[in-house]
Amino acid sequence: WSGATWEDIWPAAGEQATYEVITFGSATTDLVAYVDYTPVEWKGGNFSRFIVGTPEPGNDGMIVYFDNSVPWNPTCKGIEGFSITNTSGPAIQEWFDDPIGIDLNQPAGTQFNVTATVHSNFGKEESSFESLYSFTYVGYEESIGIPVGTLADLMYINVGITQTFSKDEPDFEVDFYLSKDEFFVGMTNAPAFVELWLKTGWAMAGK
């Protein structure tokens, strides 16, 4: 990914951005996001957090628990999603036994599969199941028009997620995009939202 450095991709502490999200209730709303690099304990480990919105009961929000300490190989432990319609706790929690790593230093066209045990809690009972994640590194020169404007030279990764292994096609697919200048640009089929797209770029809070 020409011109990209691991340290510069990540927002600085104190920076914020706004994302336009489509909720599972089909509402479109703007949510402020930031990255908290201070490790917190969650599901048996200590992780930094990418926080979108207000991750509290009765609000729309999402927390992604991650570790970015190894350059170009971030790992994700899981997510918590919150909804204005759920006032008793998270609307959803999903996490892995072992964090899933995403090698971001692969040539365009690279494909690989990861099988993982997923634990899920929709505010009722916890369930566990095996999922197959099929990663395709589509390219590093993607250009898309999103609420913040048209961005170019994006890293574009497609992930097919299969929970019914007898099927030939994934149960659903996730597209996500990263920018050298604006970090996480957005994704489809996000765990807590139908879609999530950058609307205002990363800057220090209050500026």
Image (cartoon, rainbow, N blue to C red):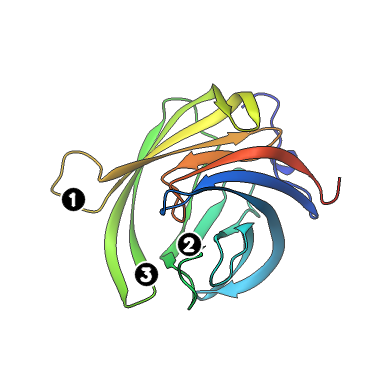
Name the residue that disc number 1 marks.
165
Residue placed under numbered mark 2 in the picture:
78
Task: Please tell me how crowded label 1 is: few (under 14), some (14-19), or many (20+) other residues with Cα within 10 Å.
Answer: few
Residue 44 x %, y %: 51, 76
User: What numbered label is drawn on residue 128?
Assistant: none
Which residue appears at 39% of the width and 74% of the height? 123
Residue closest to the eye, 31 or 2: 31
Give whichever of 119, 30 is nearer the camera: 30
Percent x, y for residue 115? 32, 53
Which is more toward the observer, 55 or 116? 55
Q: Quadrant of residue 6?
A: top right
Vertical comparison of 169 with 42: above or below:
above
Q: Nearest to the eye among marks 1 and 3: give it.
A: 3
Q: What residue lies at 56% left-to-right and 25% top-to-bottom? A: 145
Instruction: Residue at the far right: name it.
Output: 207
Question: Quick one: label 2, few (<14), some, or many (20+) residues within 10 Å?
Answer: many
Q: Residues within 10 Å of mark 3 (few under 14, many from 20)?
A: some
Q: Amino acid at mark 1?
A: Phe
Q: Position of residue 64 (x, y in %)?
A: 55, 58
Residue type (three-letter) at the residue carrying disc 2: Gly
Q: Depth-wise, is mark 3 or mark 2 nearer the camera?
A: 3
User: Mark 2: which secondary structure?
Assistant: strand
Tell me: residue 19, above or below residue 144. below
Residue placed under numbered mark 3 in the picture: 122
